[in-house]
Amino acid sequence: MKEMLRIQDLTKYYGKVRGIENLNLVLNKGEIYGFIGPNGAGKSTTIRSIMHLVNKNSGKVFVNGKEFGKDNLEIKKIIGYLPSEISLYDDMTVKEILDYHESFYDNIHDRRKNLVNRLQLDEKKKIEDLSLGNLKKLGIVLAFMHNPKLVILDEPTSGLDPIMQNNFFDILKEEKEKGTTILYSTHILSEVSKICDKVGIVKDGHLIHETTIEDLQKNNFNFITIISSDIDKIKKELDLPIILENKDIIKFKNDLEINLILNKLVNYKIDKLLIEDPTLEDLFMHYYN
Amino acid sequence: MFLREIKVNFKSFLIWLSVLIGIFLVVFLIYPHMFNKENMEMFDEMMAMFPEEVLKAFNMDIASIDTVFGWIKTEGFIFVLLIIGCYASILGSNILLKEESDKTIEYLNSLPITRSKIVLNKFLCGICYVVLMVLGLSIFNYFGLILSDNFDHRSYLLLSITPLFSSLVFFSLSMFLATFTHKTKKMLGISLGIVFISYILQTIASLSNNVSFLKYFSIFTLADTRYVITNSALNMNIIFISIILTILFLGLTLIRYNKKELI
């Protein structure tokens, strides 16, 4: 598979405060990569370093096999970028900014029309009068209208209503089919499982885990909830980390074979037994803790 | 991008030009009524009380204010230099920094355009507006003078372009200094401070020979109205220095902006 984005040993410090350190990442062509982590983990710093909005301390960024320098216009032309909080020229109308954007690229008018229709944008409106959701829609159009090969999206769905979110996910799926590579930074995990092929988890400025969505969901742990009058004895017998405890109810996080657990439980009176797979949020917390 | 910059900065250009034209319009309207023979005698008596150094500071030793042109050559040009200087300085400090304070730089930076080209487009736009400001006021005053009294056309034309040289340096210096900060308010204070400190230094320098060296620290020295009034010619050395300084600050702006963290 052809590489579209390679981040190599990327380090960025804000004075003495670490943003990211020796971060390595590879995105292949046509891949949607979920870049996940809570606020302050280093997602935006990574994106801002890629886009040269901040000066990296060390490391390199390669796009389509070529090192992405600040003034490499060939590479800039094939990148689409949607920042987490988009700010555009307030004095312009939607039409004016789309015209302005169009003036930097060749033959993109049809694609512009298509995206404007799909996202139901009113071109006559002034940017200062747009709601947060409409501003985000405009940002999405600007990020995709020049047919980029690599799109960097930072928290793209904030402010979008559920219908528009679905429209947006459809656009992402179509882009993926066209071979567009997408770096999708978010902390909303349900979005990741819907559209991403691969996931990278960032913690304290490092990429701590990278996997495919399937592998992530092929979990190696589960949750067991037991209701029993013998709860104290069961607690001693299983000796597993307790997630929740309330009178006769107890919830464990289990990484042992289920058979082994059941064998241990046969000697006790069990009223109810529930075995659950972890949600994406649980998996995320598992790596984070 | 150049046209976009022209459009964005047009409103403030109009406001500043209107203020300047307003000041001169008032002068053209009231001046003929202020200076009759009786007033002139009183005024001459008052002027005689001022030390020569003070008169020199306002060019009053080489020009009389009994006509509108005389006033323009003395006090009038202090207003022109200060106001166009403030305009150029504020324009220079805002033109790049506004993108950062409004956070539109994230969008602009994502477009296929180099940082040098961003600086050059904004620099050209600023230069255009500073030239238009000087030109606009010159044309207004020219017609005002034609309607008011007889005056030396050549002397006026040369005098009217002198603010251009100091203002270009104010503009480019402020643009360069703005590459060191992200805060527009801070930069506004610094840029206006430079204009007023320059003016104070220029005035003090003309008061006594002992402190005349201070003129080398004032950008207003580059608007050598005194030389134009006394010689009816432009001081070519000063024009040359102004152009060199403007190009130098542009070069430094390009170097700094290319290294700047934009957010």
Image: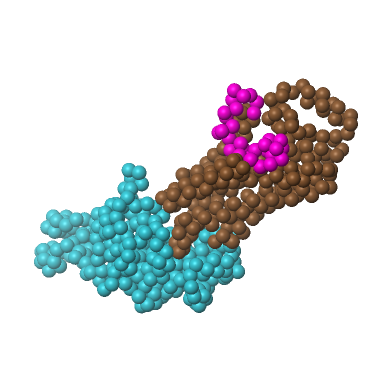
Chain colours: A cyan, B brown
> Is residue B36 visible to the viewer in this orientation of the structure?
yes
With A288 as the anchor, is B255 left or right in this view? Answer: right
State the residue at coordinates (73%, 35%): B74
Numbered circles on residues, count: 0
Report the magenta stretch's main SS: helix
Q: Which quarter of the image is occupied by the N terminus of chain B?
A: bottom right
State the residue at coordinates (48%, 73%): A106
Residue A104 in percent (x, y) is at 50, 67
| Residue B219 on the magenta span | yes
Locate residue A148: give its quadrant. Answer: bottom left
State the residue at coordinates (58%, 57%): B5
| Residue A28 on the magenta span | no
Above or below, A4 against B121 in this view is below
Residue A180 in percent (x, y) is at 37, 73
Q: Nearer the viewer, residue A115 or B127?
A: B127
Residue B188 in percent (x, y) is at 56, 42
Residue A80 in percent (x, y) is at 42, 66
> Is residue A161 visible to the viewer in this orientation of the structure?
no
Locate residue A221: give its quadrant. Answer: bottom left
Q: Nearer the viewer, residue B104 or A161?
A: B104
Q: Nearer the viewer, residue A247 or A19?
A: A19
State the residue at coordinates (21%, 56%): A242
Locate residue A260: give its quadrant. Answer: bottom left
Instruction: Please give the range of residues in magenta.
Output: B206-235
With A23 as the anchor, is A139 left or right in this view? Answer: right
